[in-house]
Image (tube, grey):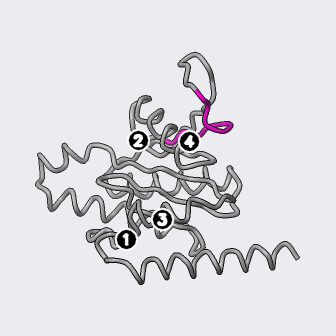
Amino acid sequence: MLGIHATITNHLRFMIANWVLGNSKPFYVRNPLTRLPTREAFDVAMREGGYIALFVDLDNLKEINQKHGYHAGDTAIKAVADSIIHHVRKTDLVSHWGGDEFAVLLYDTSKDDAKDIAGRILTHINQLGYQLSIGIGYSVEAAQFSQQIAKGWGKNQVSSFSSKLPSSYEPNQHHYQFIPFNL
């Protein structure tokens, strides 16, 4: 019975998301470069629970733009979007959060599966010559914070909170886990 409830819930969630995407201005709900839902459209889906979030940041975009031009930066952003879409399920939700950042809701997923997905995305992007910092959390905020930890450890890494986002961060507390996926 629980499986039927989850299927109906997923179906309703995507019906609502499609309605929002179909009845809004296209540049408001979809990023024109990646065609992924924007942060504003994504906010509607975040209100429900039952997901593990990934927060993905393309490392060194500024340097790519300065060295190779903005077209190369756009190519890198599209490559990240394509890689994320390729490595998640159709029932998951991917958003172009803004600039060089992406947010992903992995529904009905274990934390170990989320770590595997993040590792596959990172490995694929590294093979294309780019680097990512990826955070995993039980909310987008926790994943975003965890991604900042990964950047602080030297970029091109995955980090994950071992629990919910702490009310205050103390550097000596160990609320996060380093996951060595970097190549």
* Mark 1 neighbour density, 10 Å: few (under 14) some (14–19) many (20 or more): many
Q: What element carries label 3?
A: strand
The amino acid at mark 1 is Val
Circle 2: element type: loop
What is the three-letter code of the residue carrying label 4?
A: Ala
Dividing the picture into quarters, in which one does residue 70 lie? Answer: bottom left
Identity, as a three-letter code, of the amino acid under mark 3: Val
Residue 85 sits above or below residue 20 on the image: above
For mark 2, what is the residue?
156
**Residue farthest along the right direction in this orientation:** 1
For the N terminus, the quadrant is bottom right
Amino acid under disc 2: Asn
Marks 4 and 1, how far apart in space?
23 Å
Pick whichever of labels 1 and 2 is earlier in the sequence.
Answer: 1
Disc 4 target residue: 142
Q: How far apart are marks 1 and 3 (CA)?
A: 12 Å
* Residue mark closest to the camera, 1 vs 2: 1
Label 1 with label 2: CB-CB less than 8 Å:
no
Q: Give the range drawn in magenta.
A: 158-167
Residue marked by disc 3: 94
Residue holding disc 1? 29
The residue located at (55%, 66%) in the rendering is 88
Residue drawn 61% across the image and 36% down it: 165
Image position, residue 115 (x, y; %): 61, 50
How far, Cα to Cα, is label 2 from label 4?
Answer: 18 Å
- Sequence-wise, which precedes: disc 2 or disc 3? 3
- Residue 131 in the image, given as x and y percentages of width and height: 35, 47
Mark nearest the camera among 2 and 3 is 3
| Image position of 7 with respect to 64: above or below | below
Q: Which of these two is toward me, 62 or 41?
A: 41
Residue that appears at 59% across and 40% down: 160
Question: Which x, y percent locates residue 162?
Answer: 67, 36
